[in-house]
């Protein structure tokens, strides 16, 4: 009985020391906040729109480009090698396919990303150069998220946007992963095998919270971008529908005045 209790206590202690458990614990509150951003709520309510999804894809493109380039450059680093699974996880090519589907072959010229995405990518590049052992925090946040809630979000997105096939939704598909749950178990065990000093471990945990924060800021900025675009459109539509006549009467008067003056001068020249 005593031996059993001791074994259980020892197992619990080891689990407490597991990076995968610690990281899940410290990011729990951030995960709830990420789930409750306007953008993620639109997904969950089955109301995600094409403009929302297209802007999200643009940001994901920049984020995965930075993340995957840094992972690849550091693939032999002791803190990266165990969690480096490019053939199972890499997202960049699938995002490129989706962007081409929505924006056409010249999609590269049409990418629009908010400031938060640039800050996120800048951080990814920085840690890739200075602290490669922190990359695991970002890889965990994105890839394990994509393999968890992300799987449901893909199906919802298809319905919400009325897409007939899975075209435009390659981002959500992981053809190299036959069981997301089994793969997540393998990934967690690889995370736990990374040897880290106490200082590095704390750094990784802090970085994971930061990674969620970056994602939240990207989602919020995307919503702001959409608001601005919608407001602009609203103004143009208002202008066209006539309400703006009252708003822009002085401008219209000025243009008419100028036109009349020009017409008078032209008639004057003609008469001469
Ligand atoms: C609509 C929004 C979201 C929903 C509904 C959702 C849902 C879920 C669910 C059901 C799990 C599995 C939990 C478990 O196995 O214990 C999960 C795990 C996870 N999610 Fe999310 N999620 C959402 C957004 C996000 C976002 C935006 C991120 C990060 C950017 C994220 C990152 C993660 C991570 C890293 C895990 C793995 C946790 C672990 O096992 O350690 N999720 N999510």
Image (spheres, rainbow, N blue to C red):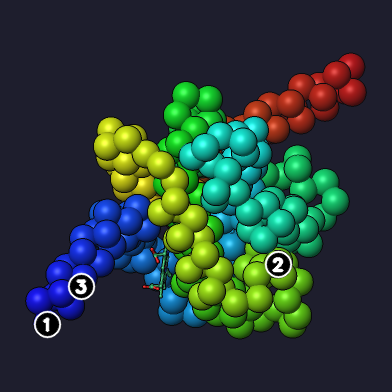
User: Is residue 224 rendered to the left or right of residue 255?
Assistant: left
Please state which of residues 150 and 26 is positioned toward the viewer in this rendering. 26
Please state which of residues 138 and 53 is positioned toward the viewer in this rendering. 138
Q: Do the residues labelled 3 and 2 touch (CB within 8 Å)?
A: no
* Quarter of the figure with the C terminus: top right
Q: Does residue 179 appear anywhere in the picture?
A: yes
At a point 36% along the width and 66% down the height, the residue shown is 35
Marks 1 and 3, how far apart in space?
11 Å
At a point 45% along the width and 36% down the height, the residue shown is 133
Q: Are marks 1 and 3 in contact (CB under 8 Å)?
A: no
User: Is residue 105 rendered to the left or right of residue 176?
Assistant: right
User: Is residue 187 rendered to the left or right of residue 5?
Assistant: right
Please state which of residues 167 and 144 is positioned toward the viewer in this rendering. 144
Question: What kind of element bears circle 1?
Answer: loop
* Of pointers 3 and 2, the one earlier in the residue sequence: 3
State the image coordinates of residue 246 (x, y, percent, origin top left). 46, 51
Q: In which quarter of the image is ligand 1?
A: bottom left
Quadrant of residue 161 in the image? bottom right
State the image coordinates of residue 207 (x, y, percent, origin top left). 36, 41
* Of pointers 1 and 3, the one earlier in the residue sequence: 1
Marks 1 and 2, how far apart in space?
45 Å
Question: What kind of element bears circle 2?
Answer: loop
Which mark's residue is nearer the viewer, 3 or 2? 3
Quadrant of residue 29 in the image? bottom left
* Quarter of the figure with the N terminus: bottom left
Query: Which residue is under mark 3?
Result: 8
Q: Residue 176 carries which label?
A: 2
Query: Which residue is under mark 1?
Result: 1
User: Is residue 210 rendered to the left or right of residue 167?
Assistant: left
């Amino acid at each position: 009985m005593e031996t059993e209790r001791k074994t259980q206590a020892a197992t619990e202690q080891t689990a407490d020391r597991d990076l995968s458990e610690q990281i899940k614990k410290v990011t729990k509150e951030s995960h709830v906040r990420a789930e409750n951003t306007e953008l993620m709520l639109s997904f969950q309510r089955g109301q995600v729109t094409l403009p929302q999804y297209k802007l999200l894809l643009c940001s994901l493109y920049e984020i995965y480009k930075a993340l995957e380039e840094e992972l690849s450059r550091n693939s032999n680093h002791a803190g990266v090698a165990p969690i480096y699974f490019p053939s199972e996880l890499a997202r960049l090519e699938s995002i490129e396919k989706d962007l081409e589907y929505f924006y056409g072959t010249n999609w590269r010229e049409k990418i629009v990303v908010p400031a938060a995405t640039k800050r996120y990518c800048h951080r990814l590049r920085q840690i890739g150069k200075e602290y490669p052992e922190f990359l695991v925090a970002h890889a965990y946040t994105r890839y394990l998220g994509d393999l968890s809630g992300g799987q449901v979000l893909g199906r919802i997105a298809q319905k919400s946007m009325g897409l007939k096939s899975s075209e435009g939704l390659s981002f959500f598909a992981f053809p190299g992963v036959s069981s997301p749950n089994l793969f997540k178990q393998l990934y967690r065990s690889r995370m736990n095998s990374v040897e880290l000093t106490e200082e590095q471990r704390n750094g990784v945990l802090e970085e994971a919270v930061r990674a969620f924060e970056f994602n939240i800021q990207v989602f919020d900025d995307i919503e702001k971008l959409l608001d601005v675009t919608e407001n602009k459109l609203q103004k143009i539509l208002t202008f066209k529908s006539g309400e703006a006549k009252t708003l822009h009467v002085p401008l219209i008067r000025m243009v008419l005045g100028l036109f009349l003056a020009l017409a008078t001068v032209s008639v004057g020249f003609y008469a001469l």
